[in-house]
Image (cartoon, grey):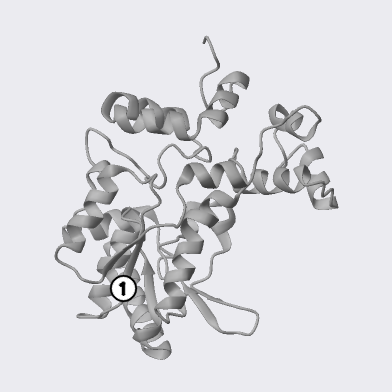
Amino acid sequence: MNNMLDYELTLFDRINVIRDTIKKYGEENFYISFSGGKDSTILHHLIDMAIPENKIPRVFINTGIEYKAIVDFVQSLAENDPRIVMVKPSRPIIKVLEEYGYPFKSKEHSCKLHEWQLGHHAPSIISYRDKERYGCPKILKYQFEEGFNMNISHFCCHKLKKEPAKKWQKENHKSIVITGMMRAEGGQRNTLSCILTNRSGKVIKFHPLAVIDKEWEDEFIQRNNIQLCSLYYPPFNFKRTGCKGCPFALKLQEQLDIMEELLPTEKAQCEIIWKPVYDEYRRIGYRLKKENS
């Protein structure tokens, strides 16, 4: 970082925010949403720094479409840390996609298109369809017309991640989830607050990394000699992990190219799981190279 003082002040602030928040609401009420990625690994270490010997569970949802290296990384941590909890969804990815529909472009697009396919033509959906800016891309407007028959929805993440997490949370009597989400990720997270409450004012989410940026993260990793999943190092050099081959990924073609060279078996799995979406992306030349190009 350009200013080491900024790093130290941010670290001091985050440690105190974590310590004060968890003390105020009770350590026994918290759990960490642990993906095995860079942000949640930093969060895992930062909370230990703020509250040594804490017993806060780190809950990893193994959706079946996590990178093998991520699963291996989480399992290796679990061997020496009983706080790591591994949870699986009740249904496999293929069954979820067949029943609820495939993700396409983004959560917003998939949500709006899903509602449209159900016959809901609310003003917000029509506005999204017709807007030139911040709406449906011109190349995808045909999906709101007759003849487009692929079942689209935004439920994939909900069914594979959120529902299993909520079920575990309820069964284990936890009321507050700690996440590694950051404003620096952009999009809808630009206005992310550190504390999120429900309508009755009860705290339900804690985002201690909300004000952190990537530069600070890198400094924290270097200073504390933190080991990340192997995907973040050469020859992979991933910037993000998440569900492999997810159609929401902006750099999907780049991701698949890397997988084809270095993770061919996992790339082949993605081609099977996401086939209808990949076929359509390639047909129209959106996010993936156009057919025969």
Image point (45%, 30%), residue name: 272
Direction from residue 53 to residue 1 in the image, left or right: right
Residue 90 position within the rendered picture, expressed as x and y whole percent measured from the top left: 45, 57
Q: Is residue 158 above or below residue 247?
A: below
Quadrant position of residue 235:
top left
Name the residue rendered at 29%, 31% in the picture: 263
For badge 1, the amino acid type reads Pro
In this rendering, the answer to whether 192 lies above or below 113 is below
Q: Position of residue 95 (x, y in %)?
A: 52, 45
| Res 273 seen here | yes
Relative side of 13 to 285, left or right? left
Q: Nearer the viewer, residue 159 or 95?
A: 95
Q: Judge left or right: residue 138 versus residue 205.
A: right
Q: Position of residue 67 (x, y in %)?
A: 32, 43
What's the residue at 51%, 63% (across, down)?
163
Q: Residues within 10 Å of mark 1 (few under 14, many from 20)?
A: some
Which residue occupies 81% across, 30% down?
Answer: 146
Mark 1 — residue? 57
Residue 26: x, y in percent?
38, 88
Q: Is residue 8 visible?
A: no
Q: Looking at the rendering, in which quadrant would you find the N terminus?
A: bottom left
Name the outermost residue toward the top: 292
Asked where in the image residue 237 lies, by quadrant, the reply is top left
Closer to us: 6 or 252: 252
Q: Which of the two residues, 143 or 211, is positioned nearer the viewer here?
A: 143
Closer to the camera in the image, 196 or 163? 163
Please tell me whether mark 1 sits on a helix, a strand or a loop: loop
